[in-house]
Image (cartoon, rainbow, N blue to C red):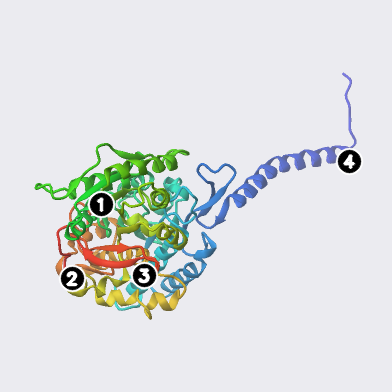
Amino acid sequence: MFRITWPLHIVKRVLAVVVALAVLGVAVPLTYQWVSERNARCADGVVKADVERRPGKRECVGVTDGSHVFAPHLRSVTERIKAENDRVAKEEERYVSVAYLTTFTLTDDDSNSDESVRHELEGAYLAQRRHNTGDLRGSPKIRLLIANPGSSSAHWQHVVDRLAERTEAPDRLVAVAGLGPSTANNLRTLRALEKRRIAMAASTMSATNFRDIDGFVRVAPTNTDEARAAAGYLRRQKFRTAVIVQDIARTNHYANTLGPAFEKAFPDKKGKHRIVADEELTFDSSARTGWENELRHMTSQLCRQKPEVVFFAGRGRHLTHFLDSLANRTCTDQEFHVVTGDDTTNLTAHELERAHRTGVEVLYTGLAHPDMWQSGEAGKRAVSAATARKFREGGELDRWFPRDARDDGQAIMSHDAVLTAARGVSMAAQWGGEVTGESVGRMFHKMNLDDSVPGGSGFLSFLNNGNPRNKAVPILRLTERKRAEFVEVSAPHGAPPSH
């Protein structure tokens, strides 16, 4: 048999090539994977993800201790949170964490504005500081994590999974506050956190059907309560007739519960106050195009019906389009008063100025306002004076973030939500109790009488279904002098609760 014999130096070279190729075969995929992972990461705990309905656009989603800034306008407050978190981790042996969750990377699909979510984070930081080192010191101390589920909360599942991982040491996450507006994805978030036995304190969620979830409370009044408070105010002001403009988008739980609640609350049995529309005035904001035209075509119907009040059951960003249409109505001699819900607080200063320029009076039920405490005896009884001072001129927020307004109430509501979580932490820890998400959630229902939360939006106690008990509701008016003028404190059952 013929045999080929290679010199030894050739054999060595062939073997070297084979080994090199084998190494490359492993190294190239690993290097590619490493580069891909690096490109997909924004920071520890934060990854890049596709923005829903925005081809080619990406956003950073996930959970951070302040090491990552989700948007440039959040830098100042994020850095303060990071510094406080680092201090707690260094000085405290046994701390727990509370996450503040809402969309921080906003698009036109979101009802919130950059302004409103920045104010939310500022209020959350104030609550953290009051609990850790301030006038409401409690134990154990808390670290405040920042959680971003992306535009429209599209990546809620990813963020919930990351939060669940942080329930173990070193973070020991026990509660999530904030939780965004009343949308379908945010309801899914609540259900997922419930399964993981993490306590929840919502700041601005008001949809009435968000209830009876284990470990969940909200510091905002429900839409039913807002509608009752608005109806009570309108009846006291002798308004007799109203129509409802209703957003029928299926995923808009806020609008879907607000309109029917007002329809039930405003009329009385004697017929002095009634809904006068002979047909439904509806639009569908979920349609990519066309909903603006639906709003424009309503003005002729309103001119025929001549209601004293138009109750707008929709988001604030859609309200501005409706007001533009109403300002261009043909029945210029007919005066309209538009009343709506708390989502108006999410409008930017520019949007609110535009709304005021239409010349249509706009009243709305807010969630909170710094002037509530100064509104006579009812306000002084309903709101903690010590907390109210934090949000007024010269208070902590004014010193820390001097260029930000407070009259949208967002900072107050986020503060009250985080303060509720912090109070639950302290109550669960008493007498050597174990602080877990489950134990904190159960403490929410013990916050009555002397244990009510001294919130800036009112003294807070909660029903078993998670709703606040007879929550104070401010009636606000858009004016040219400032973004929102306080009118009076109302409540679903007349007078708000006092402490």
Which quarter of the rendered picture does the N terminus lie within?
Answer: top right
Splitting the image into 4 quarters, where does residue 427 fall? bottom left
Q: Nearer the viewer, mark 3 or mark 4?
A: 3
In primary-sequence order, the first of circles 3 and 4 is 4
Q: Earlier in the sequence, mark 1 or mark 3?
A: 3
Q: CA distance from mark 3 to mark 4?
A: 71 Å
Amino acid marked by disc 1 = Glu
Which is closer to the viewer, label 4 or label 2? 2
Which label number is shown at residue 268?
none
Residue position for label 2: 378
**Residue 218 position in % (x across, y down):** 27, 57
| Helix, strand or loop under label 3 | helix
Is 178 in front, or is 53?
53
Name the front one of labels 1 and 4.
1
Disc 2 and disc 1 in contact, CB within 8 angstroms: no
The Cα–Cα distance between marks 1 and 3, rounded to whole angstroms, is 45 Å
Q: Which mark is residue 128?
A: 3
Lower sequence index among marks 4 and 2: 4
Image location (x, y in percent) of residue 46: 51, 55
**In terms of secondary structure, where does tag 1 sit?**
loop
The residue where tag 1 is placed is 308
Could you tell me residue 289's position as x and y percent?
A: 47, 39
Residue underneath mark 4: 9
The CA distance from mark 2 to mark 1 is 28 Å
Residue pictured at 28% horizontal, 69% vertical: 456
The relative height of residue 321 versus residue 76 in the rendered view (above or below) is above
Q: Looking at the image, do the residues carrying marks 3 and 2 touch, with CB atoms under 8 Å apart?
A: no
Amino acid type for the residue under numbered disc 2: Ala
